Image (cartoon, rainbow, N blue to C red):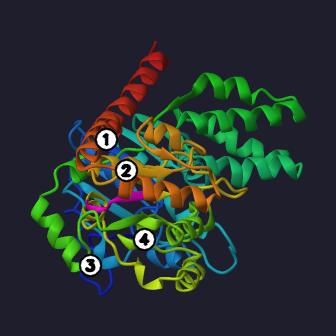
Amino acid sequence: MTMITDHLDASQPGMPPMESERPPENPTRRLVIVVRADPVICGHSGEARNLAEAALTRGFDDIRIVTWPLDTLQAAGLPLKPLHSVLPYSPGITVERPEPIGDYKIPDGRNIGGIVGRLVELFTEGVPTVAMSLYLTPHDTAVSQAAQIAKATGMCAPLTTSAEAVGSDITNIVRSAVTEGRFGAAAQVLTTYLSNDVCVAVSEFTRDLIVEAAQSIDDRWGTSFAPACTERIKISYPAINASAFTELNANDTDRALAARGLERDGYVLFLSRLSRAKGVDDLINGFAASAAQCHSKLVICGNGPEAAELRALAASTPHPERIVFFDDVDDAEKPHLMAGCSAYVLASKPRTEFVETFGIALAEKMLAGGGPVITCDTGGIGEAVGPHARIVPPGHPAAIANTLSEVILGLSSGERTREGAMARRYAMQFDRANVFAALIAHAASTAAVAAA
């Protein structure tokens, strides 16, 4: 079986930097994470990295992140980081990108076939393994199928599976299936999810969303998914490397800002995917109407499907020179930009195709310090920020304008410091060590019950 590993291909032009040495020859405990990994701009990409790094401190000596080939990610139109900006992984973490299986006669599923095949090999090498899928469709499907195959061979090593659900698993698949009367598609997602040893959701909001969708299936077809989901699903907030945000050197931050032509407390920051659901249009309009624009720049960092449209909107404002776009911010620069801003705005608004199920960037910002967070209480955002953010209604540029003026022109440095310290204490619960420890505890308790 042919596969691509990032650390082997690191010498090729345009490839990410070396991510690990070769995997250990005689591993004793393995973690496998199936995810859309770097260079995808996605919360799960960062979460996979953080879970992998945390696993190294918890007795795992072989961590594999199994993901998609780079050309597949590029062809999908997903927002991607510049390849040269992807930070290296620690030794012991290997990123694998299995090549697709089959030829043109298989119009879809070739990449899944490659991933499933590689997972079967990992599961049958005699190494006790915990396998995590982040995002149900198609990653959980791949893990569940591989586990079934590995067990059927009689060669499967001790294996515990865990699946993490996000809201779009439900909004993209299950809700659409119910609306269209496609019972099989809805049943496939939930049955596969519940077949895992550990089922988690990224927030209370997400768990409620899943149970609500499961209940709609039960009401229509007489199944019993909702009680099973209510009983089985636990909460596992996204894992963040807190130290990357809390241990910044002030001089390094000043240098990073200067390289971008910025000064501390001299700009409002947005750093996420550029899409309608993130409310960037409302932020641009709100900033343009705010008295704070005379004292600040608006810095918009990221890429995505609405990038060109948003640049055009910014160009049409009365002072377009006050709005700048950066599409090349890497993971090392991000904390410095967050720490130096006068305010961080994520004006997320719920849409049919997407609801913010947590808000990883908001928690990262709270860890980094800097000015207050301004956001909307939609989806799981309230769980990410607690009482430590200024809340504005979604789709309301005037409220953004008023709040920007309030926090930039009205807060004293002492108030800013006190608010920042409380926000950081709250966000420390999302540190990757805490999140991974809870996940492994769930897995251990499940294994103990099964053995009883």
* Of marks 2 and 4, the one in the foreground: 4
Please state which amino acid type lies under the numbered disc 3.
Arg
Task: Tell me if mark 1 has few (under 14), some (14-19) or many (20+) residues whose alpha carbon lies within 10 angstroms of its own.
Answer: some
Q: Which mark is residue 293?
A: 4
Q: Residue at x 43, y 23 (%)?
A: 447
Mark 1 to mark 2 CA distance (whole Å): 7 Å
Label 1, secondary structure: give it.
Answer: helix
Q: Nearer the viewer, residue 284 or 12?
A: 284
* Of marks 3 and 1, the one in the foreground: 1
Mark 3 to mark 4 CA distance (whole Å): 18 Å
Q: Residue at x 62, y 47 (%)?
A: 167
Q: Magenta segment, which residues? A: 340-344
Q: Which residue is mark 2?
A: 372
- Image-based side of 271 in relation to 92, left or right: right
N-terminal of the two: label 1 or label 2? 2
Q: Which residue is mark 3?
A: 260
Please state which amino acid type lies under the numbered disc 4.
Gln
Please state which amino acid type lies under the numbered disc 2.
Pro
Label 2, secondary structure: give it.
Answer: loop
Mark 2 to mark 3 CA distance (whole Å): 21 Å
Whether residue 239 is visible, yes or no, is yes
